[in-house]
Amino acid sequence: MKKNKSKQEKIEALKKSIMLRERWLNAIHSGLNAEEMAKIGIKTLPIGK
Amino acid sequence: MMRHLSETQINLHAPYKVTKDQSNTLTFLTENGVLYHIGFAEDTILEISNVYQIYIENVCDIKSIMDDKVRQTIVCVLEQFFLLENHVLLYVCDVRDGRQNARSRLFQKWFSQYKKKDLYVLKSTTKVVEGTFYYASILLKKDNPNLNLVLQEFNSLIQDLDAK
């Protein structure tokens, strides 16, 4: 069952969501591959041929 | 049901050729010399699986002139995205240059121009966090079995953040 989050917890979740963009940008600019990104918590959408 | 985006399928219809790299990022170069990156990363804010944020980056930060092929290419990518099982798109506008309002308006304009928009639900909001305006939208297909749950969680998040 899902835990009911407090407002503060939701603000923290929102900040984490906002920060995800910066982390993704830093990761691709650093030349990380998808596997390395996953190790730091950025789960990218797989793209095939 | 597809489990990943297909570069080949996107390129069947995209006016600009997209290429994927090892970071699961798609790249395309416009005829005006603007290089774009598009990527998706899973977001857990709604605690629902298959919710992804989309990132669209003008890599060289060259001012892009009006180019409808950019919109068409991004639409092709998104159409492939929505072929994936029950996927939900979360778009949080980039705030680094303070132009998040313009990005939000462009996103809404593109959606309003999209011929198949009736197949989708778009919900948008504006939030101020620590003095900065953030624009966020959620987009999913109407036949997504999690439609009601996703909208409920998104609305709940908005309402709770608004509450004193």
Image (cartoon, coloured by chain):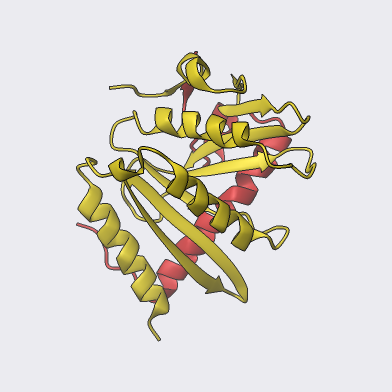
Left or right, B103 with respect to B78, comes to: right
The quadrant of the picture occupied by the N terminus of chain A is bottom left
The answer, for residue B11, to whether it is visible in the render is yes
Judging by colour alone, the chain drawn in red in this rendered image is A
Which of the 4 image quadrants contains residue B143? top left
Residue B139 left/right relative to B71: left
Q: Taking A47 as reference, is A30 above or below it?
A: below
Which chain gets the yellow colouring? B
Q: Residue furthest bottom?
A: B164
Is there any visible trace of residue A48 in the rendered image?
Answer: no
**A6 relative position to B1: left or right:** right
Residue B45: percent from left, percent from top: 40, 56
Coordinates of residue B82 in the picture (x, y in percent): 36, 33
* Image x and y of residue B87, in percent: 34, 38
Q: Position of B57 compared to B127: left or right? A: right
- The number of numbered badges drawn on the structure is 0
Q: Residue at x 25, y 61 (%)?
A: B152
Residue B113 drawn above or below residue B45:
above
> Would you identify the image quadrant in which residue B20 lies?
top right
Q: Nearer the viewer, residue A21 or B108?
A: B108
Q: Quadrant of residue B133?
A: bottom right
Residue at image x 42%, y 60%? B124
x then y, percent, for residue A8: 43, 74
Residue at the image point whose x is 73% and y is 58% from the top: B97
**Front in this rendered view, residue A3 or B110:** B110
Q: Residue at x 79, y 38 (%)?
A: B60
